[in-house]
Image (cartoon, coloured by chain):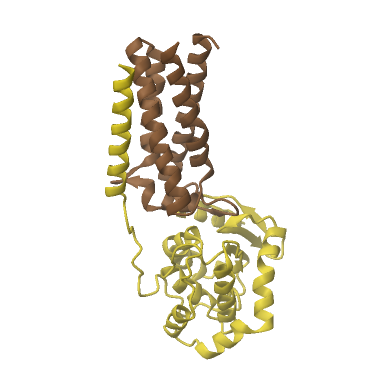
Chain colours: A brown, B yellow
Amino acid sequence: MNDRRLRLAAALVAVAGVGVAGYLTWAHYTGATIICTTGGGCETVQKSAYATIAGVPVAVLGLVGYSVILALIAWDAPSAQLGAATFAFVGLLFSGYLLIVQVFVIDALCTWCVINDVVIAPALAVLTAIRLRS
Amino acid sequence: MVGLAFAVAIVTALALVGVALVFRDNGSGTTPTTSPVVDLTGIPQEGTVLGRPSANVTLIEYADAQCPACRFYTLELFPSITKEYIKTGKVKTDYRGFPFIGPDSIKALRFILAAGKQNRLWQLQEALYRYQGGENDGWVTDDLIRERASEIPGLDVDKLFADAESKEITQAAQAAAGKAQAVGVRGTPTFFIKIGNKKPYYIQIRLDLADMRAALDDALAP
């Protein structure tokens, strides 16, 4: 894969990240997902003590993080590439923590959170890291 | 340079996790309210139905006693709905169980339905929400039910326990989830509105007063 395609892929993944985090932020503030669904668990996760840090929903952190990464990918100077990879790696580690909390602490999984933790965050970390090497 | 960024990322992530653990917002609103959030005295109650029997509009609620969203509805919105629509005789509301979260959901439903035998269903379901614990963490104990039930005027606690164990109630509680799924219920709370004897229709709403009022006003409109 050439660098142009890598950059495009990273940008698309970051957009997906903005989308998911944006949706979860919206859901957090409007209460639109306040429903308990069969096989769901989003309510438990989004209402748990771990869903906010000092009042700030973790979804907002994700939204800010992905937006910054997207901006850095758009900027694309060598320092911006390094910045994007660094941010993406922080995101990956933090997503890992959130996943551990969901599975082992609150014993509930939220589909959109898991998509972020298992697909988007790792993909973005890998893509931005590969670009540093090429 | 890359190595430095890598190190910075790890340190940042660790710091973030540390901050997250220290500043996680614990115990928001978990202290039970000891008195009912709504006074149902004087409102007719018959089995699962609360409200004047002659009310043409019925708000049907599918709920699970373990569901935090149902708790939210009952504690935050139901008092206003009661005051504006049920006490005034415009609407009656019918409780249906959809006990899908776990075995305690079925146990709670048995007692809720048993309270209906004494026309106190709506008081007991409200009381249980005030003392709701985490999903499937075993909070629906006999002791908790006995305490809550004894606070409800006119409710015979021994009869409640006997009815909750009866074959009729046990079967009804066990069949409830299947019945709810058969009409398309997939989560809780789910609301339907029934006008007169017409087929109930599902209302897709956000859990807020404006949406609830709009749906009920629409049903009441001539």
Image quarter of residue B53: bottom right
Residue B30 x %, y %? 36, 63
Q: Is residue B63 positioned above or below A133 on the image?
A: below
Q: Quadrant of the N terminus of chain B?
A: top left
What residue is at 47 percent from the left and 53 percent from the top?
A: A44
| Position of residue B222 measured from the top left corner of the image (x, y, whole percent) | 62, 57
How many numbered marks does the figure carry?
Answer: 0
Q: Can residue B79 be spotted in the picture?
A: yes
For this view, does A3 lie left or right of residue B53? Answer: left
Q: Position of residue B131 (x, y in %)?
A: 41, 70
The residue sitting at the front extreme is: B3
Q: Nearer the viewer, residue B18 or B81?
A: B18
In which image quadrant can residue B165 be found?
bottom right
Horizontal relation, residue B176 to residue A30: left or right: right
Look at the image and tell me whether residue A30 can be seen: no
Left/right placement of residue A7 relative to residue B178 reads: left
Give the residue displayed 56% in from the left and 50% down from the top.
A40
Q: Position of residue B132 (x, y in %)?
A: 44, 67
**Which residue corresponds to the image point at 46% horizontal and 48% vertical from the top-left?**
A102
Q: Residue at x 41, y 83 (%)?
A: B151
